[in-house]
Image (cartoon, grey):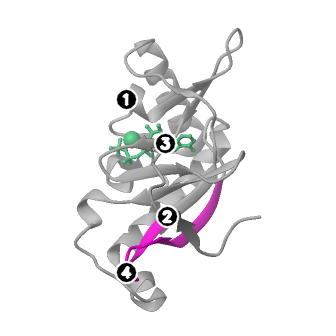
Amino acid sequence: MIPKCVILKRGQRPNGCGAFGRYYRLSKVIGIKVLSGMWSNEYCTTQKELKASNQWKEAVREARLIRVARKSRIVPKCYGVVPVRREGQNGRLHVGIVMQHIPGRVLGNREPDVIERLSDRICNKCKLSMQDLHGWNILVTGKSRKRYWVIDFTPDLIDDLRR
Ligand SMILES: Nc1ncnc2c1ncn2[C@@H]1O[C@H](COP(=O)(O)OP(=O)(O)OP(=O)(O)O)[C@@H](O)[C@H]1O
Ligand SMILES: [Mg+2]
């Protein structure tokens, strides 16, 4: 079941970090990307405030792009945008995108040819042009039969060719 609001435990460590988000695994099958970085100046304490904030709008845009990109079959499922509270952090709310947890490893700088292949696939199948796809936004699962997943759809780095 997808939670309506997520509470991160005191001291809960992220499983992954990027410039715009921290990723926390919530169960065997789902995780959440909590927006951080450039959004830390938006301090919201009520759901009404949060839902009117730029960080919420940004997360909704990202969640939409993930859903559009799912058609490529190389992108995790997206379950929506939810408020996030950190235990012990006096009332402050954050924004998180709940998604399918991919139990993989980051591609990094291995297999550079894969990046172009995945980005072409998303462009052809979904009409989304990824401006800055790199190996740290790609996860790999499987050993003998590898599967690659594109995980990061920060809206500013995507050209929506459907418009
Ligand atoms: N669905 C997922 N399943 C497993 N791990 C994930 C998932 N989404 C994100 N991660 C982990 O969290 C890290 C950061 O996620 P992501 O790249 O989406 O954040 P970001 O802050 O937007 O990054 P960037 O700085 O590249 O924009 C990833 O490198 C990965 O390790
Ligand atoms: Mg990233």
Disc 1 residue: CB within 8 Å of ligand 1: yes
Q: Main secondary structure of the magenta part?
A: strand
Q: Nearer the viewer, mark 3 or mark 2?
A: 3
Mark number for residue 15?
Answer: 3
Q: Give yes or no for contact between labels 4 and 2 (Cβ–Cβ under 8 Å).
A: no
State the SS at label 4.
loop
Q: Return the residue found at the far top.
A: 144
Q: Give yes or no for contact between labels 2 and 1 (Cβ–Cβ under 8 Å).
A: no
Residue 1 occupies quadrant? bottom right
- Residue that carries the numbered disc 2 in the rendered image: 96
Q: Give percent across and percent down for residue 125.
A: 60, 39
Which of the two residues, 141 or 158, is positioned nearer the viewer here? 141
Q: Nearer the viewer, mark 4 or mark 2?
A: 4
- Residue that carries the numbered disc 1 in the rendered image: 134
Residue 57 occupies quadrant? bottom left
User: Callout 3: few (<14), some (14-19), or many (20+) C-alpha neighbours within 10 Å?
Assistant: few
Label 3, label 1: how far apart the Cα atoms are: 19 Å
Residue at (49, 42) in percent of width and height: 15
- Residue that carries the numbered disc 4 in the rendered image: 90
The range drawn in magenta is 78-96
Q: Give percent across and percent down for residue 16.
A: 44, 41
Q: Return the residue found at the far right.
A: 1
Image quarter where the C terminus lies is: bottom left
Task: Identify whether 74 is placed above or below 114.
Answer: below
